[in-house]
Amino acid sequence: MKKLLIILMFALVPLSLLAQSALAAGGPPTDILKGVITEVNEADRTIVFQKHENKEFMTLTLGADMKPEEMRMNKKVLISLDKNAGENVMKDVSIMFMDMTASKLLALLVIGLIGGLLSGFIGSGGAFVMTPAMMSLGVPGAVAVASNMCHKFPKAMIGAYKRWKYGQADIKLGLVMATTAVLGVQIGIMIQKSILNSFGNAGSNLYVSTIFMIVLVFVGGYVFYDAWKLAKGDGKETVSKLAVRMQKIQLAPMMHFKTAKVTISAWITIPVGLFTGMLAATIAVGGFIGVPGMIYVIGASAVVASATELIIAFVMGAWGSVQWGLSGLIDIRLSLLLLATSLIGVQLGALGTTYVKDYIIKVVMATTMLIVAVSRGAKIPGYLADLDLMTPMSDPIHALLESVSFWALVTALGSAGLIITVAMVKGMSADRDAKKALAGVNHG
Amino acid sequence: MSITTFDKNMSAVAFAEAGEHDTARRILGENAKKQYGKAPAPAAKSKPYLKTIIFGTISLSAYYMLFTNEKLVTDTFTMGGWHWIYPVGAAFFFSFTHGAFASNLLSTLGIEAKK
């Protein structure tokens, strides 16, 4: 039976690799040109553009709302084409590598540190704030997603290694989940593409935000309720009733996960993995379903689930980075600046888990999920208006919702960082006191 | 039933008071052996200063090299195709060197996982 499983697992990897150009957060876009603008003709609103890949020159027409004076020459740019407007008509242009200033550098380092802390502690998190944060620093969307991906997998790798050393990560569970999650990503992208084709960009945005909201509110709410119950009781975690029932299903092949201390049918782990991947493709944070799934459906403890999620994040992130690297969209400066502090943060978060009670992990996870849900929810009216399902909002309300959305993300990150730090410091000083007391007994 | 350090110390005291110094010493000796490396108050472990400095220097010079050759790096790393090796390789390289630095830095600062 074991052999069968290993064969199954290894068969899934190439299978999923065959389904090409797919990865968490949507896949590299294909209608984007990369290169340098060499000439701008203001009179006939065209530019001469040299493509990066084959150094060919081509003439592009400016889109209706683009201004010739906004075109920056001799800098590498990303140009997206508007296929509906005609042949070689531009939709927008953005400078591929933003100029690094001291404040941007500092911002990246701070985001990296807190994102890393969160990752090390709850197994995921960071992506939901890093990509928008980079975009607000002026990084084109595709480059932001790619650079985040390339910083995520080394971070997850180091975090997973640390937590494996603490005896928390279940490698087998991680690999099984990752393989199925990779397949889930393909399904997620297929759904995304069909929505994009039939309802356009606004429809796709609405779909993403709605899924985001539903998952975060329901799952986050449940995790919060569970953590609250634990905090009120003795803090001892019990396996959920659902997981107990799932573990009773004796459907071959059965799998045993040593670190998670779970024996369960593969038919239960596969859907959990698939959903994790689908969610990763939809909202870029698969961990928000992967970790609760491992806790409440499979029956792992919060510590093991969050540690195992890092293995999944590593596999998916590494694979995604290769895809984005193939289309040459990774700004390595951004990835490495985020890594500079997030590698410290992730190890700090990982060792923090050894000092806190299990339910603290759930508290942090639930708090983050619920506040991020607010951030996404604030964007929904805008998308509804785009789809003509709602009367358009006035500009001040639009601006207000945008800032609510942004500050909710900052709050999510800030509050999670604060809870982790406080819990960790408390745990450490309690540990030190206990050791001192013991030493006192020995010497006295 | 397990015998705690406290119990052992107390029995050593009892033997010592009764004049059985050798027995007392033996009990304490065993105690020390068994508790080796797991003593409640371990002798101050030497901190990995040297490792922190070495990995810190490697990592810092790598960052310095990257940012002084910014244009060259960003251009080569974004060529696409097989050039994906560059960003992914760089990410691996930094995660090992800078990760090792971060790990040693935390140990030097006295922040370690609970045993």
Image (cartoon, coloured by chain):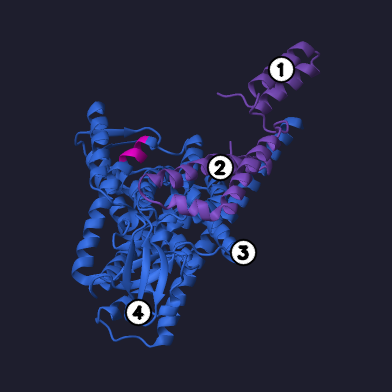
One can see residue A116 in this view: no
How far from the left and from the top, in percent, is residue B49?
Answer: 70, 37
The residue wearing badge 2 is: B99
Mark 1 packing: few (<14 Cα in 10 Å), some, or many (20+)?
A: few
Mark 4 element type: loop
Residue that numbered label 1 is attached to: B29
- Chain designation of label 1: B
Looking at the image, tell me whether mark 4 or mark 3 is earlier in sequence order. 4
Which callout, 3 or 2, points to the residue nearer the camera? Answer: 3
* Cβ atoms at labels 4 and 3 below 8 Å apart: no
Within 10 Å of the Cα at label 3, are there few (<14), some (14-19), or many (20+) other Cα atoms? Answer: few
Judged from the image, the secondary structure of the residue bearing numbered disc 2 is: helix
Q: Nearer the viewer, residue B27 or A174?
A: A174
Q: CA distance from mark 4 to mark 2?
A: 50 Å
Query: Of the residues shown, which amino acid type is indicated by label 3?
Result: Ala
In front of the other: label 3 or label 1? Answer: 3
Give how far across and how far down residue A207 sits, in percent: 27, 67
Q: Which residue is mark 3?
A: A102
Image mark for residue A45: 4
**Label 3 lies in what chain?**
A
User: Going from the N terminus, do you reach mark 1 or mark 2 first?
Assistant: 1
Q: Are marks 3 and 2 in contact (CB under 8 Å)?
A: no
The mark lying in front, picked from 4 and 1, is 4
Colour displayed for chain A in the image of the structure: blue
In the image, which disc is placed on residue A417? none
